[in-house]
């Protein structure tokens, strides 16, 4: 279990006053925290990473562990990989099996497979009309991710991109704290909702997540709203 961050402490770290640029350490704290949240959100993920990218170069990167950090480093060494592709295309990218013969990123896939990475889901971090980076989750199992996990990670990337865009500029502590709280609450509500569905339907974690996404699509609502309703909260009006 990972301890929840103290939002008051983060508010102090993330900003002093409007008009002052934030430190490199602050940005690192933000990307590390969001990487942990992504890993905890996505079923099957053994690790996650967040990269801020400008003109093809990383300006900051966060990772949950050494495996993720090395898998990300390999993408920049070879100038290829799902994270860079998601950023350059501004679209989600999934690698289902790094040991498959037909690879979009042959050098990265071979090196990643040798480390034990078998699959990866990466989504862009988009703020306004600009793609500021990418968020990705890794698994040691082939085919660990699917369309449902892709949609969930994409939805999570929206508040993450808003937060990271502010961290790179001059937003106030209150604004940053609000967006971070929203992202963390979404993760926690979805986890609680999955637990409820697992108990009610007698299914596993992955099946519960798919059921949650299916209900959201049928109701034309967000996964977060459906999760809030399942856990006894009040969702937004669609």
Image (cartoon, rainbow, N blue to C red):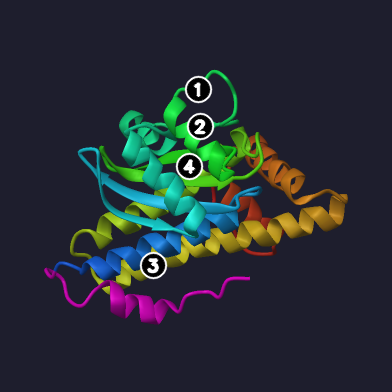
Say left or right for 80 vs 120: left
Q: Which residue is mark 1?
A: 103
Q: Are marks 2 and 1 in contact (CB under 8 Å)?
A: yes
- At mark 2, the secondary structure is helix
Q: For residue 159, what is the image quadrant?
A: bottom left
- Counting other residues with Cα less than 10 Å from the Cα at mark 1, is it few (<14), some (14-19), or many (20 or more)? some
The answer to which of marks 3 and 1 sits earlier in the sequence is 1
Q: Residue at x 66, y 41 (%)?
A: 141
- At mark 1, the secondary structure is loop
Q: Which residue is mark 3?
A: 178
Q: Are marks 2 and 3 in contact (CB under 8 Å)?
A: no
Asked if one can make out residue 210 in the rendered structure from this viewpoint, the answer is yes
- Marks 3 and 1 sit apart, C-alpha to C-alpha, by 41 Å
- Marks 2 and 3 sit apart, C-alpha to C-alpha, by 41 Å
Q: Are marks 3 and 1 in contact (CB under 8 Å)?
A: no
The answer to which of marks 4 and 1 sits earlier in the sequence is 1
Say left or right for 202 vs 53: right
Q: Bounds of the magenta span? A: 1-20
Q: Nearer the viewer, residue 126 or 24?
A: 24
Q: Nearer the viewer, residue 200 or 164?
A: 164
Q: Is residue 122 above or below residue 30?
A: above
- At mark 3, the secondary structure is helix
- Marks 4 and 1 sit apart, C-alpha to C-alpha, by 23 Å
């Amino acid at each position: 279990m990972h301890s929840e961050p103290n939002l008051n402490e983060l508010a102090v770290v993330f900003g002093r006053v409007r008009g002052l640029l934030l430190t490199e350490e602050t940005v690192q704290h933000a990307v590390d925290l969001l990487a942990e949240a992504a890993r905890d959100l996505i079923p099957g993920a053994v690790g996650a990473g967040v990269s801020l990218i400008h003109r093809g170069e990383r300006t900051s990167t966060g990772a949950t562990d050494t495996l993720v950090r090395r898998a990300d480093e390999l993408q920049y060494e070879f100038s290829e990989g799902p994270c860079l592709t998601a950023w350059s295309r501004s679209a989600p990218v999934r690698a289902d099996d790094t040991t498959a013969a037909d690879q979009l990123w042959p050098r990265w896939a071979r090196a990643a497979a040798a480390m034990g990475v078998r699959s990866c889901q990466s989504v862009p971090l988009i703020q306004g009309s600009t793609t500021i980076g990418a968020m990705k989750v890794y698994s040691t199992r082939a085919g660990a991710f699917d369309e449902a996990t892709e949609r969930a990670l994409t939805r999570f990337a929206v508040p993450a991109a808003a937060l990271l865009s502010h961290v790179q500029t001059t937003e106030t502590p209150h604004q940053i704290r609000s967006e971070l709280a929203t992202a963390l609450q979404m993760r926690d509500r979805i986890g609680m909702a999955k637990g409820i569905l697992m108990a009610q339907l007698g299914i596993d974690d992955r099946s519960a997540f798919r059921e949650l996404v299916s209900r959201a699509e049928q109701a034309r609502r967000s996964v977060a709203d459906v999760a809030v309703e399942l856990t006894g909260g009040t969702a937004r009006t669609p």
